[in-house]
Amino acid sequence: MSSEETPLNGYVCAPYLHNHDSIELKDTWSRSKNIEDMYFVTATFSNESKPYFTDCANHYLLAKFKDDKKTMKDLSKHQFEKTSFVFSMDDDLFEREVDGLMNFVSVYYLEYGDSVEDISEVARVVAKRNKVGRACLGHMNIYSTEPPKFTFPYNKNIVVLEVSSDKSHQSVNQYCEKTRRDICRKGITMTNLVGLSVLEKLK
């Protein structure tokens, strides 16, 4: 079945602006059975992705959802000037138990497609990193009251890693960057889109 027919799980990032709409969206997701977990996070966008998302925020609500269609419906009712991101997961590369609580989500994009060989290589490299609890492949939709100046060309080749560690966010970010470089050494151009550091678990 195609993704148009089948609900997909994934992650949503909505800017937390400390205004009525942000608080209302947080309350909606707190009550929603579609939202499994929700976090307050700080976002660090890469230099490569900033030109596409010039209106990005510093703080976001990060939520893990079961059904991307329901999540996108929520965002259509709560749109902000700053961009919201929906990462719908098409394939799990792996998911496993790791020590510690998830405290970082790293989002990347593949610049040159997603051949089976490339995806298998990404999975092999990431699987060696014992702090990564989940790695998945998907696509991205964005929501904003202000359309972006430039169209992001890699929205169908998104890679998301969940990382669990008791070390500092800076240390975890370096850990993810080393993982990315290891993949690039295999001849696969994987570029950082955004790193999301968990500040507080809300649900």
Image (cartoon, rainbow, N blue to C red):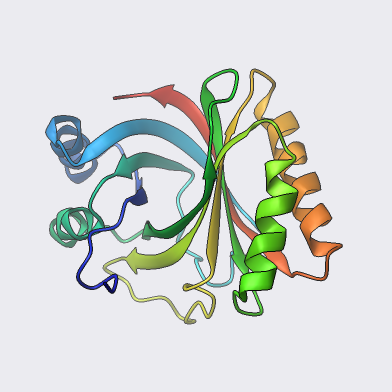
Snapshot quadrant of residue 20: top left
Left or right of 122? Residue 158 is: left
Q: Give the residue drawn at x 59%, y 64%.
A: 50
Asked whether, in this view, residue 18 is left or right of residue 149, the answer is left
Find residue 88 and report its image quarter: bottom left
Q: Residue furthest right?
A: 185
> Depth check: 155 or 130 in front?
130
**In the drawing, does residue 87 fall left or right of residue 26?**
right
Q: Residue at x 53, y 33 (%)?
A: 96
| Residue 47 visible | no
Q: Residue at x 52, y 21 (%)?
A: 101
Q: Where's the N terminus, which quadrant?
A: bottom left
- Compared to residue 103, the image places residue 190 above or below, namely below
Work out which quarter of the rendered image holds the C terminus and state it: top left
* Residue 195 drawn above or below residue 47: above
Looking at the picture, how far across and down is residue 13, in whole percent?
38, 49
Query: Residue at (56%, 58%) from the top-left corner?
Result: 159
Indicate the position of residue 191 as horizontal and vertical percent values: 68, 63
Looking at the image, residue 121 sits to the left or right of residue 197; the answer is right
Q: Nearer the viewer, residue 136 or 108?
A: 136
Numbered-mark total: 0
Q: In the depicted view, which residue is nearer to us: 14 or 133?
A: 133
List x then y, in percent, for residue 198.
50, 30
Q: Residue 15, position in %: x, y?
A: 36, 48
Residue 77 seen anywhere in this rendered image of the structure: yes
Position of 74 relative to 185 (above/below): above
